[in-house]
Image (cartoon, helix red, strand yellow):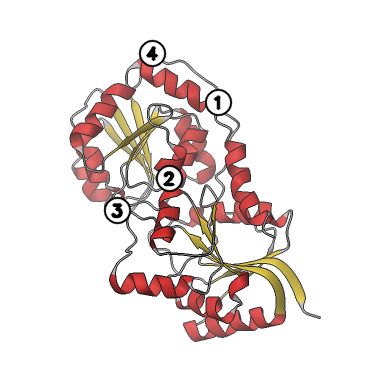
């Protein structure tokens, strides 16, 4: 008799936030995770921390061996749902069309902001989706993408890409001086850190701390004034201490499919300022409630929000609102999106 699983996930790499999500799902459902072993450029080792409490395979060898092993796994097992972590690899495509359409689901982490819905790419994505019955979208811009692709199956908004290292609900702490700003992430072009530095070079009375590493580190340091500090890599477990010693979190990305660090910052009590190309902004950020969203690369709009958020009466209202957010409920929504499948 074939071994049975409620869900089989096929994804690329064992990121810490996905491991946490799978562990929670595994408390209620029998799951198997197949890691395809695709590379993740410019990710530090800490990104992959986590102890899996579920069965998993990590595919080895060339692409032919990986495809063969994936097919063998699917042939030997009974399963209710196959959840594919995207449409951008050959293994995902073969697994999608090898498995029954009624069992197939795909996780959509791309948004309508950066993913093409025209020409050949549009047709290719439609072909993939034609053999998929469920789309798990992270948020609103991800759902709009799938609708633009004329997907006819069931759409489930999960509310995230994985589970953060959730802290207790932050306490409200009144502040009279707001001057310490924070960025956490890779130091690469798409994160748009040069824009951030250009802005803070014009606010010498404010401090900007940059946490992370990447190919642009030397260049970014060379154009930074004395009010900008680079801390390099910080382990995930130590980040709460960094958040709690700052006042505001900023993510200026040119493209960001979700923005897990925005969740982390809010969970640690920080109001946020993000560009409108950060995928989570529609679902997690309420304008003038827990943060601000500016049009990407709009210097005037960015300056306006910096000036607003440093006013104690505005800042403290944002912090108070954040202290009332139920972050456990956000985690529950993600978990239940998979656990409650029929």
**Res. 208 image quadrant:** top left
The residue tagged 2 is: 280
> Residue at label 4?
176
Q: CA distance from mark 4 to mark 2?
A: 29 Å
Between tags 1 and 4, which lies in front?
A: 1
Give x and y (percent) for residue 86.
47, 66
Residue ID at (18%, 42%): 223
SS at circle 2: loop
Judging depth in this view, the residue of 7 and 36 nearest the camera is 7
Which quadrant holds the N terminus? bottom right
Mark 4 burial class by Cα count in 10 Å: few <14, some 14-19, many 20+ = few
Find the distance from the CA under tag 1 to the CA under tag 3.
Answer: 32 Å
Q: Residue at x 54, y 42 (%)?
A: 237
Query: Residue 230 at x, y = what percent?
Result: 32, 40
Residue 232's x, y, as percent?
Answer: 37, 45
Q: Can residue 245 be seen in the rendering of this structure?
A: yes
The residue that disc 3 covers is 190
Marks 4, 2: nearer the viewer: 2
Q: Earlier in the sequence, mark 2 or mark 1?
A: 2
Q: CA distance from mark 3 to mark 2?
A: 16 Å
Tag 2 near tag 1, CB within 8 Å: no
Please, is residue 85 above or below residue 204 in the view?
below
Is residue 62 at all visible to an observer of this figure? no
Compute the Cα span from label 4 to label 3: 34 Å
Q: Which residue was labeled with disc 1? A: 324
Find residue 83 and name its label.
Answer: none
| 4 or 3: tag closer to the N-terminus | 4
Q: Are marks 1 and 3 in contact (CB under 8 Å)?
A: no
């Amino acid at each position: 008799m074939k071994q049975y699983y409620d869900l089989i996930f096929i994804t690329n790499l064992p990121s810490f936030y996905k491991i946490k999500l799978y562990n929670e799902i595994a408390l209620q459902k029998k799951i198997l995770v197949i890691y395809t072993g695709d590379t993740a450029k410019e990710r530090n080792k800490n990104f992959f921390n986590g102890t899996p409490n579920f069965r998993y395979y990590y595919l080895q060898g060339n692409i032919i061996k990986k495809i063969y092993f994936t097919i063998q796994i699917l042939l030997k097992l009974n399963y209710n749902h196959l959840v594919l972590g995207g449409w951008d690899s050959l293994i995902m495509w073969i697994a999608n069309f090898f498995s029954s359409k009624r069992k197939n689901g795909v996780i959509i982490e791309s948004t309508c902001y950066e993913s093409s819905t025209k020409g050949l790419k549009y047709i290719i994505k439609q072909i993939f989706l034609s053999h998929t019955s469920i789309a798990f979208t992270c948020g609103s811009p991800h759902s709009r993408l799938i609708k633009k692709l004329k997907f006819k199956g069931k759409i489930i908004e999960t509310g995230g890409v994985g589970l953060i290292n959730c802290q207790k609900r932050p306490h409200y702490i009144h502040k009279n001086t707001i001057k310490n700003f924070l960025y956490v992430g890779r130091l690469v072009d798409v994160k748009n850190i040069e824009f951030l530095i250009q802005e803070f070079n014009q606010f010498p009375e404010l401090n900007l701390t940059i946490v992370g590493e990447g190919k642009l580190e030397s260049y970014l340091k060379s154009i930074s004034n004395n009010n900008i500090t680079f801390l390099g890599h910080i382990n995930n477990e130590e980040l709460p201490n960094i958040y709690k010693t700052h006042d505001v979190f900023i993510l200026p990305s040119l493209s960001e499919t979700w923005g897990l660090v925005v969740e982390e910052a809010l969970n640690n009590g920080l109001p946020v300022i993000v560009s409108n190309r950060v995928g989570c902004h529609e679902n997690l950020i309420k304008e003038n409630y827990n943060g601000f969203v500016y049009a990407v690369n709009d210097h005037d709009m960015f300056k306006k929000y910096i000036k607003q958020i440093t006013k104690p009466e505005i800042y403290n209202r944002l912090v108070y609102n954040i202290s009332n957010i139920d972050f456990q409920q956000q985690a529950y929504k993600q978990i239940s999106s998979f656990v409650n499948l029929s």
